[in-house]
Image (spheres, helix red, strand yellow):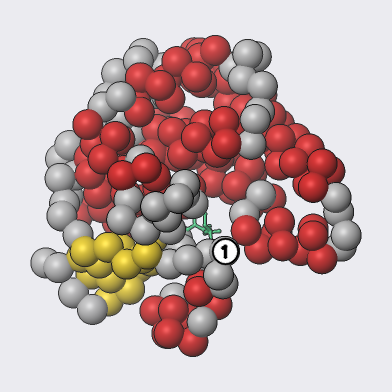
Amino acid sequence: MTLRLYSAWRATAPYRVRIGLAIKGLAYDYSGVDLLAGQQRSPAYRAVNPQGLTPALEVDGRVLTQSLAILEWLEETHPEPAILPKAPFERHTVRAMAGIVACDIHPLNNTRVAAALVGLEMSETDRLAWIQRWIVDGFTALEPMVARDGRGFAFGDTPTIADCCLVPQVYSARRFSVDLTAFPAIVAAADHAAAQPAFAAAHPDRQPDKPAAM
Ligand SMILES: N[C@@H](CCC(=O)N[C@@H](CS)C(=O)NCC(=O)O)C(=O)O
């Protein structure tokens, strides 16, 4: 099986998939997509993913999109090490945690939404406050869940899809100067996960498309 990941070094949705691939021990070729230059909207990239968003994972010429769907596909095709618990209630909790990040925080803050806000003449200060607001809103819901169910990781004592989502979102929160003092369980889980080799390999700083000047 040959894999090619279309990724953007600092973007959180491809970062989730890089973590999943690393946990599963899968090697892949890497194609960087320059989001600031608008490469995601180019005809060449839209031929890969017509939605014009990263990530996309090419598997033997077939293209998978949507980070959560890709993580679930990874779990189904490479069950070990598992990134979902076995019990249905526990699987639900992990998916709910992931959903808070991937469905309720991130879509309000991605590149195209930021560009739309600039188009509406929102100031830089207001745009930063917007980004912070939705991260704080989501983390406020997530914090008691991680405090209740985390035992090292966001859920339990092994990494799950919840951590694949949480670590990039905490990276983004720090990038956008969110005050994380109200979220000790989230910070502890994300920092613990980020220190694991699979998570470290997926970090934005280790990606080939990271510009030399950053
Ligand atoms: N729901 C999608 C979101 C994908 C997404 O928004 N990706 C961002 C990077 S984190 C992107 O490519 N943005 C380009 C843009 O907004 O123009 C997923 O989870 O894969």
Residue 186, percent across and down? 51, 21
Q: Quadrant of the N terminus?
A: bottom left
**Image point (57%, 64%), residue name:** 36
Single out the residue that lies furthest toward the right.
121
Q: Crowdedness of circle 1 by 10 Å Cα count: few (<14), some, many (20+)?
A: few
Q: Name the quadrant containing residue 130.
A: top right
Q: Is 72 left, or right, of 114 in this rendering?
A: left
Residue 187, percent across and down? 50, 19
Q: Name the quadrant containing residue 115.
A: bottom right
Q: In this view of the protein, which residue sits in the foreground, 91 or 33?
A: 33
Amino acid found under the numbered disc labelled 1 = Leu
Residue 111, visible in the rendered structure: yes
**Image point (64%, 44%), residue name:** 104
Q: In this view of the protein, which residue sits in the foreground, 214 or 22?
A: 214
Residue 195, percent across and down? 30, 24
Single out the residue that lies furthest toward the front.
213
Q: Give the total number of marks visible in the rendering.
A: 1
**Compared with residue 39, is residue 143 higher up or lower down, i.e. above or below?**
above
Q: Name the quadrant containing residue 38.
A: bottom right
Q: Is 82 left, or right, of 113 in this rendering?
A: left
Residue where numbered disc 1 is placed: 36
Residue 58, percent across and down? 28, 70
**Compared with residue 107, is residue 59 higher up or lower down, i.e. above or below?**
below
Secondary structure of residue under mark 1: loop
Single out the residue that lies furthest toward the left.
1
**Image point (62%, 20%), residue name:** 180
